[in-house]
Image: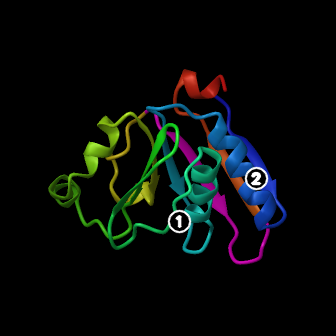
Amino acid sequence: MSVRLLRARDIAEFQELAAVFARELAAGDVVALEGGLGSGKTAFVAAAARALGSEAAVTSPTFTFWHRYGGSPALEHIDLYRIEDAGEATELGLEEAFSADAIVFVEWPGRLPGFVPPGAIRIRITGSGTEPREISIEPGTDRAGSR
């Protein structure tokens, strides 16, 4: 399993990389998105959703915790930034996203270690604002790594 490092010079290139990445995903894939505030995690999910056929306006689920978007397959979008512990995630029913026949994106996975399945694809985004972005992609399973 090797880590791929990609660079995007601007937001358009960043969105295109996210779209190309999304077209390689399949129902059941889980993507853990890491990066600082303003790094583009939600923008990445928005570009992925469009590439999967969703016409929904993708917004950050920071305050709602979980959004579901149409497309083929559907896309689940979870944000753990405000989650305090595993009990809160269970109380909110967030683990139900993983039982769906969908692609699941999880922002801030480090806030709740063990929540994201071990086979998740890990993406780390660095840069913010108008800066170029670096995107490292680490496949979490043999299936994801072969694509």
Could you tell me residue 146's position as x and y percent? 65, 22
- Residue 122 inside the magenta-drawn segment: yes
Mark seen at residue 6: none
In depth, the one of 36 and 57 nearer the eye is: 57
Q: Residue at x 76, y 53 (%)?
A: 16
Around disc 1, counting alpha carbons within 10 Å, would you say few (fewer than 14), some (14 to 19), or many (20 or more)? few
Residue 16 left/right relative to 60: right
Return the residue nearer the eye: 124 or 57: 57
Q: CA distance from mark 1 to mark 2?
A: 17 Å
Quadrant in which the C terminus appears: top right
Q: Is residue 16 left or right of residue 56?
A: right
- Outermost residue toward the right in this view: 9
Q: Amino acid at mark 1?
A: Ala
Q: In the drawing, does residue 47 fall left or right of residue 68?
A: right
State the image coordinates of residue 70 (x, y, percent, origin top left).
Answer: 47, 48
Q: Amino acid at mark 2?
A: Glu
Precedes in sequence: disc 1 or disc 2: 2
* Quarter of the picture holding the N terminus: top right
Q: Is the residue 85 above or below the residue 94 in the image?
A: below
Residue neighbourhood size for the residue with mark 2, other residues' Cα within 10 Å, grouped as few (<14), some (14–19), many (≥20): some
Whether the residues at callouts 1 and 2 have beta carbons within 8 Å, the answer is: no
Residue 24 in the image: x percent, y percent?
64, 33
- In percent of width and height, residue 48 lies at 61, 50
Q: Which residue is mark 1?
A: 57
Q: Which residues are magenta?
A: 119-132
Q: Residue at x 47, y 32 (%)?
A: 27
Which label lies toward us, 1 or 2? Answer: 1
Residue beneath disc 2 = 16
Label 1 element class = loop
Magenta segment: does it hold 80?
no
Which residue corresponds to the image point at 84% horizontal and 63% vertical from the top-left?
A: 9
